[in-house]
Image (tube, coloured by chain):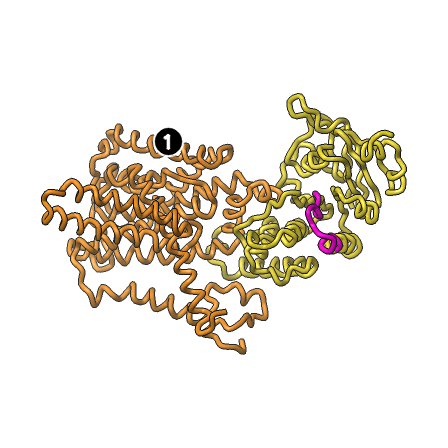
Chain colours: A orange, B yellow
Amino acid sequence: MSSNRWLATGNYFTSYKEEQRIFFTSLDRAAMSLLLLCLFIWPFFIVVDNKYMLVIDNILVAVIAVMGLNLVTGFAGLISIGHAAFVGIGAYTIASFARVLGDSHALLTHAWPLLILIAGFMGAVFGAIVGLPALRLKHLYLAIATLSFQMIFQWTINFMNFFNQGQTISVGRVVWLTGQVSRSQHYIFWYYAILVVIVFCGFAVRNLLRTRYGRCLVAVRDNDRAADAMGMHPGFTKVYAFALAGFLAGVAGALHAYLYRGVGIESFTLHHSISFLAMAIVGGLGTLPGSFLGPLAIKVLDLQVERLSEWAGAHLTFATNLATALRPLSFGLVIVLFLMFEPRGIANWWRIARSYVKLWPFRY
Amino acid sequence: MAHLIVSDVTLTFGGLQALTQVNLSIEPGFITSIIGPNGAGKTSLLNCVSGFYHPTKGEIQYGQRNLTHASPHQISSMGIARAFQNLELFRGLSVLDNLLLARHQNLQYSILHAIIYFGKTSRLEAENRTYVEKVINFMELEPYRKKMVGNLSYGVQKRVEVARALTLAPKLLLLDEPMAGMNIEEKEDIVRFILDLKKEWGTTVVLVEHDLGVVMDISDQIYVLDFGEVIGSGTPNDVASNPKVIEAYIGEE
């Protein structure tokens, strides 16, 4: 390439293979590498106490789950209000192993990467089953079908003795190359574990989206009649979209189980499904950066509002009720404001910023 | 090349008779037009051929294969492509992606290959991109390659619609009113594309169109439908002098 490799001053590609690259300029690649490097090394310089480390880990788990939800709802256009149930399937897969084998069985503590993968596949199987109504149903009717799956899931867990009727089922501490991960290292260890999973999933999804397996999702969203005429099986594609979302949700669920060292139904309720949907919307439906930005924004907002309401509860004693209501209120408000003013989500700001930088210092 | 034969096709929706015993024979390498007043059943007929509707009675045969009960994605893999009357594009994708989607059947790699991307997937994507570029050149869509389809003008979207059907590399192309709502220059462009298509690519074209001037000029064979029945067929001259056709279009004296 004869031109400037750092700024996109023009398209100098001479083959179609060259145009397949993810990072069009070296600047893009450098920025991404730098971001990843920062994410991996910051814990060496900044020490955060466990409470906040847990929040950070939580954000990362939510990123994986929302990535899945974004595939099915954002890219394939199939509204899923049962995503927390898929996450729950992953978590309860781990819990089942813990119930049957005992919570510190070697399989659970040593072969945890394998179990996370198994949990992902369980999620995919359930995703495909729940996706079956998509063969016939569309839009809101399909949303109701996924909602009913959420209800069935909660009901099943709550009434089955095997699952401790929704009470916490504990999962043992895992073992790593350096021996058992101790209490003080727990959150930092899972920070790295989840980060690695995210990097893998992120690149996998990014690659998937530029192949026929990603394009067909958008095709059934935009026009499933035309997708049919172009040689895709729309029904199969929709089931596949659900399976894909289920896989990522299952992985997220398994990580959640290990992170909290236990599984209880209260983490996989309808409330969580809706909050995943909110993260996807705020981040930007149908965009990959949105899956990262959405959970980050919502969780940070949640944390800030919680601190604010604590402060308000302590100082303004006459308004304690108001202070407790602040959290759900701000959550609802953010979603409504985003739907009104920026339906394409934070990812759109990201896009605008990027295109500005690309053309800098010229404005055309 | 295969011959498309529609024999005794009847299509009913409840009490409504959309098509009544329609017989067509579409010769390979020809431009065959289907004309008729509004509501005559032209689009219904195309829907039957492309698998969106299944005829209540009768058979559709393409070469050795029976299309009567095949679904649209099966039919598209047999080399029959369809451009829609009301734009049915993937609005959220670029022109390039719209066309690449039509190569879906040709991109045979597994999901694991897709995740890794390097190697097989990359090679197949580049190969199919070459084909797509050929179609883009043919349909003169170069300036719009990377543009989002939903933001393009109507005339260009219509052209993308035809291009997408062409990207399937069809032997038989069904065009449903490709010129509706276009101005004279855009119509001339599309006519030029259709004629080139016949000459250079040897594609059989079935054209549903309201513009009688265009139809009379470029068709090798014309079928006239009215109220779901074939009321006349033959070369443009035969049809133009057929009293039944004149009656359907202009009315009785």
- For label 1, the residue is A148
Residue B187: in magenta span: yes
Residue lying at 65% horizontally and 43% vertically, measured from the top left:
B84
Q: Chain of mark 1?
A: A
Farthest residue, direction top = B15
Name the residue type under label 1.
Ser
Farthest residue, direction front = B253
Depth check: give the residue in front, A183 or B21: B21
x then y, percent, for residue B152: 59, 55
Residue lying at 29% horizontally and 29% vertically, measured from the top left:
A155
> Is B180 left or right of A243, judged from the image as shown?
right
x then y, percent, for residue B195: 78, 53
x then y, percent, for residue A44: 21, 66
Is residue B201 among what the camera can see? Answer: no
Residue density around tag 1, few if under 14, some if 14–19, many if 20 or more, within 10 Å: some
Region in magenta: B176-188
> Is B246 left or right of A313, judged from the image as shown?
right
Q: Give the answer, above or below, for where B144 lies relative to B69.
A: below
Is residue A308 among what the camera can see? Answer: yes
Residue B48: in magenta span: no
Q: Dividing the picture into quarters, in which one does residue B67 lie?
A: top right
Q: Give the answer, above or below, for where B252 lies relative to A276.
A: above
x then y, percent, for residue A10: 53, 72
Question: Could you tell me which secondary element the residue under label 1 belongs to?
Answer: helix
Depth check: give the residue in front, B98 or A128: B98
